[in-house]
Image (tube, helix red, strand yellow):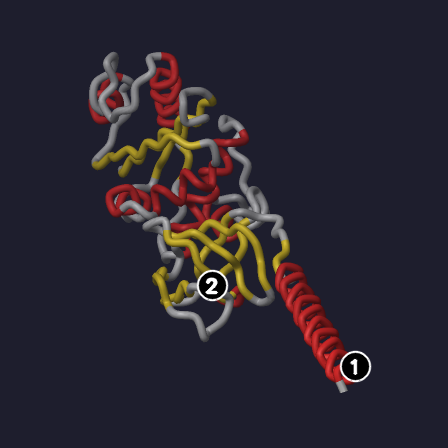
Amino acid sequence: MKVVGFAKKRLTRVLILIVFVFVFVVSGMSMSFGMQHYYKVDFSTAIVTASTLNVRAGPGTQYKVVATVKKNEYIRVFAGVGNWYIVQVEGDYVGAVSKQYVKPIYPGINTGSASQSTGNSGGSKAITSDMNVDEQEVFDLINRHRTDSGLAALKSDPEVQRIARIKAKEMVDSNYFSHTSPTYGSPFDMLKKFGVPYKSAGENIAGNSSNSEAVIAWMNSSGHRANILNSSYNYTGIGVVTGSKYGKIYVQMFVGR
């Protein structure tokens, strides 16, 4: 009887061990399966297409809403999981949004609607010869946001363009970050000194390492956004110069005539 009792105890222990190993293996498989859902995306910025978009704590409607974003706002995209994107929005909230309500932005590609309003009769993307690659990308992103908001695209003014670049270079060379130049004064003083006529004017500046992220920062700031979406402005100049602790300095000047 003792032998039988020992055998039963041993058999019970073996069965418990088998169950434990089985549960462990299944759990490991579930974790691996979950990780396989995440995939890389070939873009880092997207624009919201829904009137209001919920940012959730996880990739599904069962997760609570941690933030909301409005139509035409830019969001930063880190990865995809199923039909959801893992994103960062204003306020440094990180969460998940349904991919059907956002549109990826590929620099230099998804800018057709903005360029069509620049007077390019061919209907293709307008290339402004006096802009470098960075300036052209910012110009296209800004105009895309204006046209998506029902406003006319800004036109590039060669002299305002030159002034914006001078200001950006001075900010890098003189290591300052301000709307007031130690050489030329305020943006309005600077335009006057260079003989640029205007009825209204404004300026946005930024320090960033990414063109799209610089535009996101502007669009998420009420003052900068107001300049970009100001219907009284019809001309612009954009200066982007590499340097400074930020990576690049951005200056956009707006002129209304």
| Secondary element at image label 2 | strand
Quarter of the rendering containing residue 12 = bottom right
In the image, 66 versus 254, the foreground residue is: 66
Q: Residues within 10 Å of mark 2 (few under 14, many from 20)?
A: many
Residue on which disc 2 sits: 97
Q: What residue sits 70% from the left and 71% below the top? A: 17
Q: Position of residue 235 (x, y in %)?
A: 35, 37
Above or below: residue 164 compared with residue 173: below
Give the residue type at disc 1.
Answer: Val
* Residue that mark 1 sits on: 3
Q: Nearer the viewer, residue 151 or 9?
A: 9
Q: What's the amino acid at mark 2?
A: Val
Q: Determine whether, in the image, residue 68 is placed left or right of residue 109.
A: left
Q: Earlier in the sequence, mark 2 or mark 1?
A: 1
196 vs 120, left or right, is: left
Q: Nearer the viewer, residue 195 or 150?
A: 150
| Residue located 41% across and 56% down the image | 148
Q: Secondary structure at mark 1?
A: helix
Quarter of the image for residue 83 reads bottom right
For image coordinates 42% across by 46% down, the residue present is 143
Query: Dividing the picture into quarters, in which one does residue 213 lie?
Result: top left
Q: Residue furthest bottom?
A: 1
Q: CA distance from mark 2 to mark 1?
A: 63 Å
Mark 2 or 1: the one toward you: 1
Quarter of the image with the C terminus in it? top left
In the rendered view, tell whether residue 38 sits above or below residue 130: below
User: Does 110 sit above or below residue 156?
Assistant: below
Horizontal and vertical percent for residue 44? 53, 47
Give the percent coordinates (x, y) of residue 153: 40, 46
> Residue sitting at 45 percent across and 26 percent down?
247
Q: How many marks?
A: 2
